[in-house]
Image (cartoon, rainbow, N blue to C red):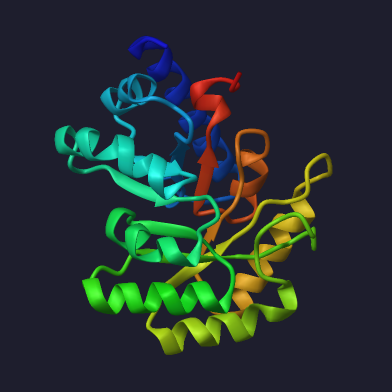
Amino acid sequence: MTQDDSGARLQQVTAQIAAAAKTAGREPGSVTLVAVSKTQAADAIEPLLAAGQRVFGENRVQEAQAKWPDMRARWPDVELHLVGQLQSNKATDAVALFDAIHSVDRPSLVTALGAAMAKSGRRPRCFVQVNIGDEPQKGGCAVADLPALLATAREAGVPIAGLMAVPPAGVEAAPYFALLAKLARDQGLAELSMGMSDDLETAVMLGATYVRVGTALFGARG
């Protein structure tokens, strides 16, 4: 993909976000676009960097460790978000590398992250992933377990900025986004990581502050 292609795709997604924000009576700047660069090689990511995108999301700690140090040396203002599941034994590496972690979903991970943050002094913003559709195959804490997990995070010194969710596939996302927004309000959390390429406008209308977009920026994966 050329830099022109990347710039056009970035402009299109940014315009979608801005239009949805305007319709919802929100400032476009209140929504951060996370370009999900998982499985993408550096040569696919660099045109987006050149076009001005600075917030990127990765699924795996090891993949991010392999490709981002060189790019960050050239673009030091990049913000890196972990948007995939995190194993507790990778917590130290994740805290060292990422500026935000969107997939906090269980007490053992909270404990590991708290220890890593205390040791390193780095405190990435964290989001609790909620299994909003109660799907057994998906990560995320159960809705009923959310208050207890947030209490555990407070005790462990893990800064929780907000909530994250992936609605069930193939159904209308709006009710799930609305539920996540209500849960966040009830818990006094300001940030919502929700919405992807297919449903980002709905997510922004319902309060998303971070949208995680891969396909619309990079094209469908083969």
User: Is 12 placed above or below 192 here?
Assistant: above
User: Is 214 placed above or below 211 here?
Assistant: above
User: Is 50 placed above or below 106 here?
Assistant: above
Regarding residue 107, the answer to whether it shows in the image is yes
Q: Is residue 43 left or right of residue 25?
A: left
When asked about the image quadrant of residue 161, the answer is bottom left
Q: Residue at x 32, y 56 (%)?
A: 99
- State the count of labels: 0
Q: Residue at x 51, y 67 (%)?
A: 162
Regarding residue 56, the answer to whether it shows in the image is no
Instruction: State the image coordinates of residue 199 (x, y, percent, origin top left).
Output: 67, 39
Q: Residue at x 54, y 44 (%)?
A: 21
Identify which residue, 190 or 129, lies in the foreground: 129
Identify which residue, 29 or 35, lies in the foreground: 35
Instruction: State the image coordinates of residue 197 (x, y, percent, origin top left).
Output: 61, 34
User: Is 32 placed above or below 43 here?
Assistant: below
Identify which residue, 135 or 179, lies in the foreground: 135
Instruction: State the image coordinates of residue 164 (x, y, percent, origin top left).
Output: 58, 59
Q: Residue at x 57, y 27 (%)?
A: 215
Identify which residue, 119 or 206, lies in the foreground: 119
Q: Is residue 189 left or right of residue 166?
A: left
Work out which residue is located at the far front of the displayed protein and give it.
89
Work out which residue is located at the far right of the displayed protein and give it.
171
Instruction: State the image coordinates of residue 143 (x, y, percent, origin top left).
Output: 72, 73
The N terminus is located in which quarter?
top left
The C terminus is located in which quarter?
top right
